[in-house]
Amino acid sequence: MTNEERVYKDYFGEVRIPAGKKWGKTTQRSYENFLINDELMPRETVYSLALVKKAMAQANAEVGELDQDKADLIGKVVDEIVEGDHDEQFPLKVWQTGSGTQTNMNVNEVIAFVANEKAGEEVIHPNDHVNMGQSTNCTFPTAMQVAASVTIDRKLMPALEKTKETLKNLSGKYKDTIKNGRTHLQDATPVTFGQEVYGWYGLVDEAQKQIEATLSFMYNLPLGGTAVGTGLNCHPDVPEIAIGLLAEWTGLDFTESDNKFHGLTTKDQFAFTSGALTSLAGNLMKIGNDVRWLASGPRSGLGEIEIPANEPGSSIMPGKVNPTQVEALTMVAVQVMGNDTAIKVASSQGNFELNVFMPVISLNMQQSINLLADSIVSFNERCLEGIEANEEQMDKLVEDSLMLVTALSPHIGYDKATAIANKAHEEGTTLREAALDLGYVTEEEYNEYVRPEKMV
């Protein structure tokens, strides 16, 4: 059926669909009318939209609105779509109508065309059957929410769990390795490297919990609201059945929104979840910066840890090792922060009954989730898992630290302790030498009071 060019004529004029294409006239017009850059609608959104079609077809069949054979045929085609068998049939750009109508019709048309190929006759209509009881205005936001939820659950959460495992192991390995703490990028009292890494663990764990806390809002689907939230042309029992199927198929706790006017006019759940993703990005930026500071050198920087040498760091300086995994991770963090701004501005643009910035929200949300997941896996496998503490350097810097004087304050007072630290710094001596020169403590007292292992 697709070996020849197809020509359609309607109110808008003539449209020609090239040979080999399984889409219809709405898709072709969008393909021709929106030649804007190269960002395609995210595959996850397309697949989720197809899954919504399967759920709605089965629900419509269950209530007697659609023949069961037609519903099953639609379901078979959707199964092929979500397996990636028809990816080339979804060519539309993000930069189209703000409702996503053209992508909704792209999915409707491809499902109908492939279904009719299988049947050997025209039995499925893209609007009357595939889009039965639906409007883009409720199916597209539903698909966006399903796509974001599934990608977070199946891709981001496992990446975070694996990273937490690495950090927990690293923290345990170095639980007794004492190093300088630092505040304001200045020497502070000692910590163990294990404690420092446990702080990193908390950054990942808390961000994960924050993301999880937002998902109940993402799970609340406006399916069945149709054009403006009233549910016109949709059987009243269908949304609950279809959403139940989506929950069963994905293993996620999707529920039917009890206020579909809200569900259509705003995308505040995306702003909320994106905010949590941005919190994760900020925490990853912090961890990455700590790693690159600690690995700086190796001889003219802190040099307290060694990171894996994955590739040459310079085209001119032999033997140079750069924190490239950190740089990739922190660039991702910057992109996610930028995406969050776009999502929040777009979410604010609901006018009356509909938000018409949905494709750009979906693009940025999916990119943020995928970038975070991929970069976390890469950073964990190619950097974190290979970190080794330079314990000799850590010991040296602890011994040289002026902030060990803090242990003397309870015994000799803040002012005398300050005098010791200033003298040692100005004269380039050790704290021990300065303390004994000033006569504020005896050598025995110094040895008793200044014990780094007791300060952590």
Image: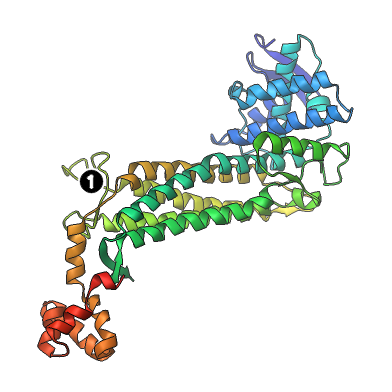
Q: What type is the residue that disc 1 sits on?
A: Val
The answer to which image quadrant residue 430 occupies is bottom left
Is residue 151 shown left or right of residue 255? Answer: left
Is 380 situated above or below 59?
below
Residue bearing mark 1: 321
Is residue 21 shown left or right of residue 396? Answer: right
Q: Is residue 215 visible?
A: yes
Q: Residue 312, percent across and down? A: 23, 40
Q: Quadrant of the N terminus?
A: top right
Q: Residues within 10 Å of mark 1 (few under 14, many from 20)?
A: many
Q: Residue 138, percent across and down? A: 76, 41
- Residue visible at 39% across and 48% down? 166
Q: Residue 90, percent across and down? A: 62, 27
Q: Helix, strand, or loop for circle 1?
A: loop
The answer to which image quadrant residue 437 occupies is bottom left
Is residue 84 shown left or right of residue 63? Answer: left
Nearer to the camera, 222 or 22: 222
Q: Is residue 103 visible?
A: no
Q: Residue 169, percent across and down? A: 36, 50
